[in-house]
Image (tube, rainbow, N blue to C red):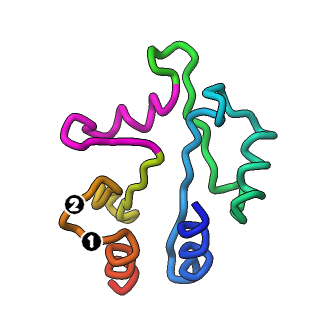
Amino acid sequence: MPAAASYYNENKSKGLELWVVLGETADGLQPDLAYCMAYAESHGMNPENLYIDYNPEALNKAWDTLFSHIDSTTTNIGLPWEAVVEGAEMTYIWNSVPTDSGPAEQVLDGLLSE
């Protein structure tokens, strides 16, 4: 998280956005506003970039919405998990599972230079 926050702070003037989706607390519970604020502060982030994705009615509860929009059967998703989405078209481009796409910074640098 510190590397992502640092990269974001260095490149936000170029249009980069950082979204952090919190599905659960460190104890596996539903995050609340106080938890999100403390998380943002501890990672040097703007709390407006944090989103809670927890559904107490779902089987796995955390990240129910996020992973319903990603084909996780084609990737070996583990947590923590990072992804790059091209914002204009909302195109899913990269994730932190080892790929041939290179590191996130390389992918982001390419997008930001377009």
Image coordinates for residue 94, horizontal then vertical, percent: 30, 60
Side of 112 where 44 appears, left or right: right
Mark 2 crowd level (few <14, some 14–19, many ≥20, 10 Å Cα): few
Q: Is residue 84 left or right of residue 39?
A: left
Q: Image quadrant of residue 7?
A: bottom right
As measured in the structure, the alpha-carbon distance from the residue carrying label 2 to the one carrying label 1 is 7 Å
12 in relation to 93, above or below = below
Residue that label 2 marks? 99
Magenta stretch encompasses residue 64: yes
Which residue occupies 45% across, 43% down? 79
- Quadrant that contains the C terminus: bottom left
Residue at x-position 19% and y-position 41%? 74
Mark 2–mark 1 CB contact (< 8 Å)? yes
Helix, strand or loop status at disc 1: loop
Give the residue at x 31% y 40%.
Answer: 70
**Three-letter residue code for mark 1:** Gly
What is the number of the mark on residue 102?
1
The range drawn in magenta is 62-79
